[in-house]
Amino acid sequence: MFLNNSLRFSGRARSGLLTGMLVTVLALSACSSDNSDNNSTTGGGTPVSSEAGAAVKVSIEPAQTTNVNPRTPIVVKAANGTITDVTVTNTAKGTKVKGTLSPDKTTWTSSDVLGYGAKYSIDAHAADDKGKTVEEQSTVSTLSPAKQANPNMIPAPAAVAQSGVGVGQPIVFQFTYAVKNKADVEKQLSVTSNPPQQGSWYWIDDKNVHYRPKTYWQPGTTLTVSAKIYGVDFGNGVFGAEDRTETYHVHDSWIAKADGNTEQMQIFHNGQLVKTMPISMGKDATPTHLGAHVISDKQKDYTMDSCTYGVCKGDPNWYRSEEHWALRMSNDGEFVHENPNSVGAQGNSNVSHGCINLNADNAQWFFNNFGLGDVVEVSNSGGKQLPVWDLYGDWALSWDAWQKGSALN
């Protein structure tokens, strides 16, 4: 009995020992599983990143290395380190491209605009926090346009730098090549007015786009006009040649109101009537156009030849004469000017070829006070509305109709 009890006791001890060993093994197995996890923690500390100790890397954009648009900046980035040096060189000219480094020194971006049809070498260096360095090199070649379009401005900024422009002056960009992608180009055009005034663009044709406000400009307005078209695809192999920004100033309001019924022209300065003068407008065969005309040029002495707008010698309406104090108000031969031959008709009948005739004193006064961008509003002439395409026929359209001429509407 004693021996049997001893044996039973030993069996229970062995069973307990095995159970304890199994618990120990399971515990050790659990610890081993935790230690194999790459994102484990040790002693409740910070997670250990799988990226720890990774080498510094440098990347260069654009990844496309040929036919790159020159407006695309060159961007160099460093991962797991900082940029120490970037050199971008025009390989043909040897000139360096300037750039800026981000505050954390991980990104370098070119600040100079690249040229057309040019090749650039890029040499970039970066280092990690232990001083280990890496170098990355690349080349970028920019596209070569078949043609480059310049953004000519009307009126020429230099011509009105001292005098300013009148309240009716549209702002015109005249491109040297036709624009197919009008919306893309128009997005890069802007007119900022101070004080602010609502305005919109209108494409007269494929080369000319005009900007005018909803109503005449306020006197004293400053206009900042920009065309950010360099690198812009005009279509058909044409790209913008250069960016341009100019400033215009709007002078006092000068508006003349010429009435074919009364044969009088009233002159308003900043809204106040200051003078009334007798006139003679276009006769029945050659009536003066109706509507708002904008002065586009002024010459003390001017040879007027109807052949300039297609009425040449041999036509019964052809004329050629030397006139004085002439201010052009449309592109088809309409001027305000002195005409001593029509003084007897001025104030009672229309006898001109479409111009507004004045006597010598009134013509000189008008010439001295009116300039580019000032307005002549014609009513009751018997003529048709001045066409929108007739240089500055912009005011012939209602505001709604004008806005529809934008490529963005």
Image (spheres, rainbow, N blue to C red):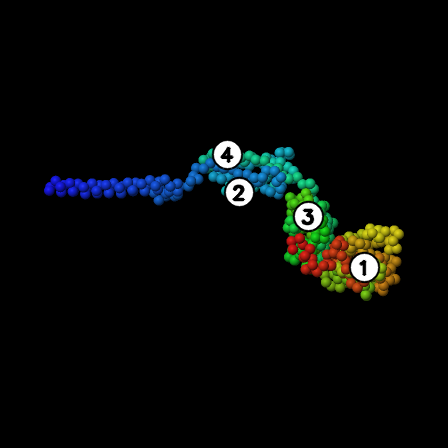
Residue 154, position in %: x, y? 72, 50
Q: State how far apart marks 4 and 1 are (Cα).
A: 76 Å
Do we see residue 224 in this rendering? no
Q: State how far apart marks 4 and 2 are (Cα).
A: 19 Å
Per the image, the residue denoted by label 4 is 134
Label 3 CA crowd tier, 10 Å (few <14, some 14–19, many 20+): some
- Taking 315 as reference, is 121 above or below it? above
Do we see residue 58 in this rendering? yes
Secondary structure at numbered mark 3: loop
Three-letter residue code for mark 1: Thr
Q: Nearer the viewer, mark 3 or mark 1?
A: 3
- Which mark sits nearer the N-terminus, 2 or 1? 2
Three-letter residue code for mark 2: Ser
Per the image, the residue denoted by label 3 is 180
- Taking 302 as reference, is 24 above or below it? above
Q: State how far apart marks 2 and 3 are (Cα).
A: 38 Å
Residue 102 is labelled as 2
Residue 208, position in %: x, y? 72, 50
Q: Nearer the viewer, residue 169 or 397?
A: 397
Farthest residue in the bottom direction? 262
Residue 378, position in %: x, y? 78, 61
